[in-house]
Image: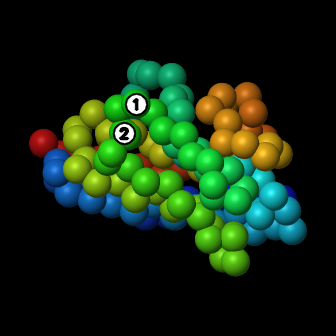
């Protein structure tokens, strides 16, 4: 397993959409859970969404339920985060991480490989 690499961040107006991608090449990508976390200035890193290795289980932060969708393409070693109806409070650096776990964990301590992050800025 190697370090995940995020892409797709940027500046967007409130109400619009953005899709983040995270590529995590490795022999065991399709047996690892993947998660998205975010950290706003002055705040702790928080869980956003996670998906099990099969894609059959997903978890979301309450404030993004119904707006964000996590998915994965194991053939491409890639996980996505589709973010719709963005709000200014979604502004943060978004991190992708992988976990040796057959579920869809929510805790940062469950994840052992982390990307460098991609900035998402939502203007109101």
Label ID, residue 45: none
Instruction: Please identify the quadrant where the C terminus is shown.
Output: top left
Vertical side of 24 occupied by 115: above or below: above
Indicate the secondary structure of the residue bearing disc 2: helix
Residue 20 in the image: x percent, y percent? Answer: 45, 60
**Residue positioned 37% across, 40% down in the render:** 65
Q: Residues within 10 Å of mark 1 (few under 14, many from 20)?
A: few
Task: Give the residue number, with chain letter if any, for mark 2.
Answer: 64
Kindly give the residue lying farthest to the bottom in the view shown.
75
Nearest to the observer: residue 10 or residue 99: 99
Kindly give the residue lying farthest to the left in the view shown.
124
**Residue positioned 43% across, 54% down in the render:** 69
Residue 57 in the image: x percent, y percent? Answer: 62, 48
Vertical side of 117 occupied by 61: above or below: above
**Residue positioned 66% across, 76% down in the render:** 76
Residue 71 in the image: x percent, y percent? Answer: 53, 60
**Residue positioned 72% across, 56% down in the render:** 53
CA distance separating discs 2 and 1: 6 Å
Indicate the secondary structure of the residue bearing disc 1: helix
Label ID, residue 62: 1
């Amino acid at each position: 397993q190697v370090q995940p690499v995020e892409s797709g961040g940027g500046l967007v107006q409130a109400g619009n959409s953005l899709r983040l991608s995270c590529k995590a090449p490795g022999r065991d990508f399709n047996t690892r859970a993947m998660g998205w976390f975010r950290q706003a200035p002055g705040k702790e890193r928080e869980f956003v969404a996670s998906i099990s290795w099969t894609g059959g289980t997903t978890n979301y932060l309450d404030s993004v339920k119904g707006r964000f969708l996590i998915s994965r393409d194991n053939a491409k070693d890639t996980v996505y985060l589709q973010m719709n109806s963005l709000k200014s409070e979604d502004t943060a650096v978004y991190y992708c991480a992988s976990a040796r776990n057959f579920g869809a964990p929510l805790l940062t301590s469950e994840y052992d490989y982390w990307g460098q992050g991609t900035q998402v800025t939502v203007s109101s």
